[in-house]
Amino acid sequence: MAVTYNILDLGKSHYNDAWKLQKRLQSQRISGQIDDQLLLVEHFPVYTLGKNTPREHLLTKESDNISIIQTDRGGDITFHGPGQLVGYPILDLNQYKRSITWYMRELEQLIIDVLKEYDINAERKKGLTGVWVKGKKIAALGVRISKWVTMHGFSLNINPDLKYYQGIIPCGIKDYGVTSMADLLGNDVPDMSEIKDTLVQHFIAKFSIYKN
């Protein structure tokens, strides 16, 4: 059976616009109207809270240059903004493995494999979700699954303004910092379009293996 994925590059988008699109696509995927999707986007600055995020993890108030949005995903509070690549897979896990744990670990491995292409040795941290380099978080994950169809996903810090993380307790974790590819590679950081291409190649190769 041929494996089909639709890749949608949204460019820069407000968070709520991408969220609305995800909901529509998830519904269409549940009903079998469309194939699996991968949305790629850079958001305008926003703090997003997971459905169970304690409000004390938000250390600042909404301002002219950043909004605050309560979402329906799992996970804690995080930042999205320019220079960060966000991926929203809309996948029917009935065609892969009906396991949230498996799916989260595969998303982490996807990011680890992409970073390896740029000589960045990333890893998981026991008991925590996400991807880490030298004890600092470089990628965050948070998903919502309905009838085994996914939405929300991951964010990879390429070259965002890391100062925004000072306004939150990122992912509710006080003990570790946040990093980016630019922090690690300096002027050698690839541009967004190249990293998108690399990620799409790894995404298709990885999930095609498991698809029934």
Image (spheres, rainbow, N blue to C red):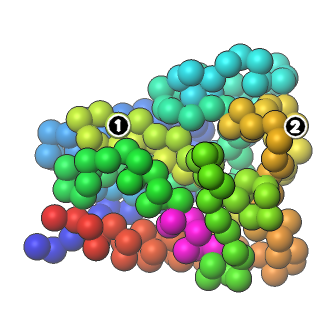
Image quadrant in which you'd find residue 21: top left
Instruction: Evaluate if marks 1 and 2 touch, with contact meaning CB atoms under 8 Å apart.
Output: no
Q: Main secondary structure of the magenta part?
A: helix
- Residue 193 place in picture, x, y as percent: 60, 72
Give the Cα separation between the discs numbered 1 and 2.
30 Å
Residue for badge 2: 166
**Nearer to me, 86 or 76:** 76
Find numbered disc 1 in the image and state the secondary structure of the residue it sits on: strand
Three-letter amino acid code of the residue under disc 1:
Ile
Q: Is residue 89 above or below residue 152?
A: below
Who's the residue at 53% across and 41% down the image? 142
- At label 1, counting other C-alpha atoms closer than 10 Å, the crowd grade (few under 14, some 14-19, many 20 or more) is some
Label 2, residues with CA under 10 Å away: few <14, some 14-19, many ≥20 = few
Residue at 32% of width from left, 47% of height from top? 99
Residues rendered magenta in the picture: 109-115
Residue drawn 50% across the image and 33% down it: 74
Residue at position x 62%, y 82% in the image: 117
Picture coordinates of residue 172, whole percent (x, y): 71, 32
Instruction: Name the secondary structure under disc 2.
Output: helix
Q: Earlier in the sequence, mark 1 or mark 2?
A: 1
In magenta segment, residue 112: yes
Query: Residue 144 in the image: x percent, y percent?
Result: 41, 36
- Which residue is at the front of the view, 34 or 10? 34
